Amino acid sequence: MANEESEKGFLTMFLVMVVVTLAIAFGIAIWVPGDPMLKLRLAITYGLLVLIFLFGFVILAAIASGKIDITELIEEETGGASTSRFQLLIFTFVIGLSFVLIVACECKFPDVPANVLALLGVSASTYGVSKGIQAGAKNGSSTTDSSSTTQKDGSGPGGPGKTT
Amino acid sequence: MHSLATVARWEGVVLLGGFLGVVFWKLLTGSIPLAGLLDGDVRDSESAHGFSSQASAGRAQSLMVTLFVAMWYLLQVIHNPREFPKLSDTLVGGLAGSQALYLGGKAQAMFLGRLRNLLK
């Protein structure tokens, strides 16, 4: 029942987004004076801009209202907060924010220095290796102590936990 | 065309700022819990689950270095928002070393257990 309502809500939102996009595109095509090719280009570009913004805004609103649950965003399988996830989150936001700031100031796609990519690479690799260590410890725990409680009740790093 | 660029610019700022704001707000209010951020699992044969939890120095130093590098980077961008800041190799190397230390400590704790038990 709740699933049906959710699907209905999503469909309604999607229809509203498409209608708004088309209305803006038609508005530009009809009322903006100028060369027809330019009007067509403007209508498509503004339409796509609005559509992308509405998609992003719907996701943002769903996260803010709790419909999209991000409470386990930096949680480890075992329950506590994960340092590797936290640092990846920080660097993603910091570099993303700086990218938007630079684009906003310069109005062009900036050159990304190798060291900035290295910074993100170090951060993402740390997260990946951390997951690898956890998976390795889980496998080691399974093979060396198959009769332990870890395997019986599924708790601890060897337990099923959440998917990553 | 100039106004198109302005719209695109503000769109990016609003969406990314919004995502950042929501995540930051949820971190502040505890909706995204930070409990156990400095605790690491360690192999422990005496524990019922095979693992126990203990404060981790590796995590603490990794967190401090991460926050320092992130703050430094943000300050550089705020001072000159016209290009990506020039990061020195030392800074990136320091971060990589810090993360390597954290991962090494984690691997040792999860595969081998506490150091003092190893040395017995």
Image (cartoon, grey):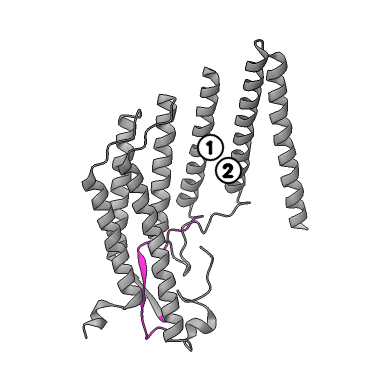
Circles 2 and 1, Cβ within 8 Å, touching? The answer is yes
- Chain bearing tag 1 is B
Q: Decide if residue B49 is in sight here.
A: no
Q: Quadrant of residue A28?
A: top right
Query: Looking at the picture, which amino acid does disc 1 mark?
Result: Leu
Disc 2 marks which amino acid? Answer: Leu
Q: Which numbered disc covers residue A1?
A: none
Majority secondary structure in the magenta region: loop
Up the image or down, A139 lies above or below A37; here it is below
Residue A159, position in %: x, y? 50, 76
Could you say whether the residue bearing mark 2 is in a helix, strand or loop? helix
Q: Is residue B116 visible?
A: yes
Same-chain check, marks 2 and 1: no
Residue B117 x %, y % = 26, 82
Residue toward you, B14 or B33:
B14
Q: Is residue A111 above or below residue B26?
A: above
Span of residues in magenta: B31-50
For disc 1, the neighbor class at 10 Å (few under 14, some 14 to 19, many from 20) is some
Q: Position of residue B99 (x, y in %)?
A: 30, 58
Q: Please report the residue visible at 52 percent of the width from the left and 70 percent of the height from the top.
A: A161
- Per the image, the residue denoted by label 2 is A60
Q: Is residue B45 magenta?
A: yes
- Residue A1 spot, x, y in % from top left: 78, 58
Q: Is residue A113 magenta?
A: no
- Which residue is disc 1 drawn over? B15
Task: Name the residue: 70% across, 35% down.
Answer: A17
User: Farthest residue in the top direction?
Assistant: A34
